[in-house]
Amino acid sequence: MKFADLHLHTFFSDGTFTPEELAGHGARLGFAALALTDHDSVEGCARMAAACAAAGIEFIVGAELTAEHADTEVHILGYFLDPENRTLLEKIAGFQAVRQNRIREMVAALNQVGVPLQVESVFALANCQSPGRPHVARALVKEKLIGNLDEAFEKYLKKGRPAWVPKTKMSALEGVGLIHQAGGLAVMAHPGLNRTDEIIPDLVDAGLDGIECFHTKHSTAMSERYLEIADKFHLLVTGGSDCHGFSKGKPLIGGVKLPYEHVEKMKDAAGRKTVESLNR
Ligand code: AMP
Ligand code: FE
Ligand code: FE
Ligand code: ZN
């Protein structure tokens, strides 16, 4: 049997692994295919493609867009994207700027409550275009301003705490369109985590291609539920570990193994999409 992990993060967003380390783990675990899905970024895809090629693993270009619909946060995974698509890169750059400004606001709020974190130490640690709360948490730990990552979220960073800053997000419908115009497939990420079931029909109307049925945080019952939903709406089935390296405890890669037949179906669908868009 061949397997894939289609949900992985590197240090190009809030993971801790380099693309080379991630490909190394993929090879050790015997994966046939891997997709990189950093938050609002395709920055790491070139290196990941090279690392996977060296390891004899098929690589799928991806990204995880932070979006919202009807006041619900929803993450939209894009697969088989053209990583040089101009519109995609422009839009992503805009949301990366939003993320960077949000880091400045979070640090200012921390300073307000007497925590002497410097914004430079967060940016130096993050060292990527797409920083987020986990980088602030790690900087707090590194500067010995808090004991551990969980405490950082509990005390300062989670919603309702002093350094929580809302994030301007793209609309989910815009996200689906953005992925499509870049030649990709749009997939709803970890539906069991965000309580996003009510918005599935709207996204399907907007052209959603698939749904992430298998995820580290999905119970067997949840996966079965989303397999039924995929069947009902004629959606592709995807899955992945959502491994962030060591940024959320232990690395999760290897915990979810998507049977490769689903990748075949995605490739068929992505190929059809490209042909459709060429005929337009
Ligand atoms: P952001 O997109 O900047 O709001 O950050 C969201 C990221 O923070 C996601 O990857 C979450 O999984 C992560 N996160 C949220 N709560 C915690 C926590 N208590 N410990 C570690 N990571 C967390
Ligand atoms: Fe993340
Ligand atoms: Fe996510
Ligand atoms: Zn993710």
Image (cartoon, rainbow, N blue to C red):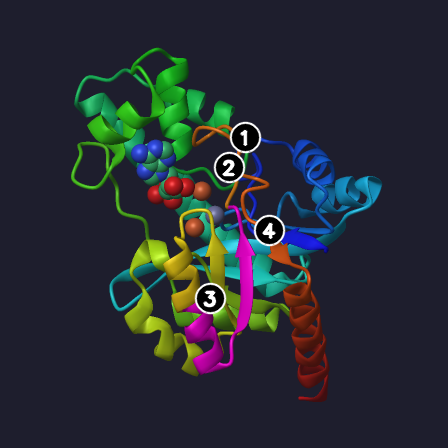
- Mark 1 or mark 3, which is nearer the start of the sequence? 1
Q: Position of residue 210 (x, y in %)?
A: 52, 70
Q: Circle 4 — which element?
A: loop
| Distance in Å between CA atoms under marks 3 and 1 | 26 Å
Question: From which residue to which does the magenta span run?
Answer: 226-241
- Residue 13 seen anywhere in this rendered image of the structure: yes
- Mark 4 highlights which residue? 257
The amino acid type of the residue labelled 3 equals: Gly
The amino acid type of the residue labelled 2 equals: His
Check disc 4: other Cα within 10 Å, few if <14, some if 14-19, many if 20+: some
| Distance in Å between CA atoms under marks 1 and 4 | 21 Å
CB contact under 8 Å: marks 2 and 1: yes
> Does residue 103 appear to the left or right of 17 in the view shown?
left
Q: Circle 1 — which element?
A: loop
Residue 229 is one of the magenta-drawn residues? yes
Q: Circle 3 — which element?
A: helix
- Mark 2 highlights which residue? 244
The amino acid type of the residue labelled 1 equals: Thr
Looking at the image, which is closer to me, 230 or 172?
230
Front: mark 1 or 4:
4
CB contact under 8 Å: marks 1 and 4: no
- Mark 3 highlights which residue? 175
Q: Is residue 157 above or below residue 48?
A: above
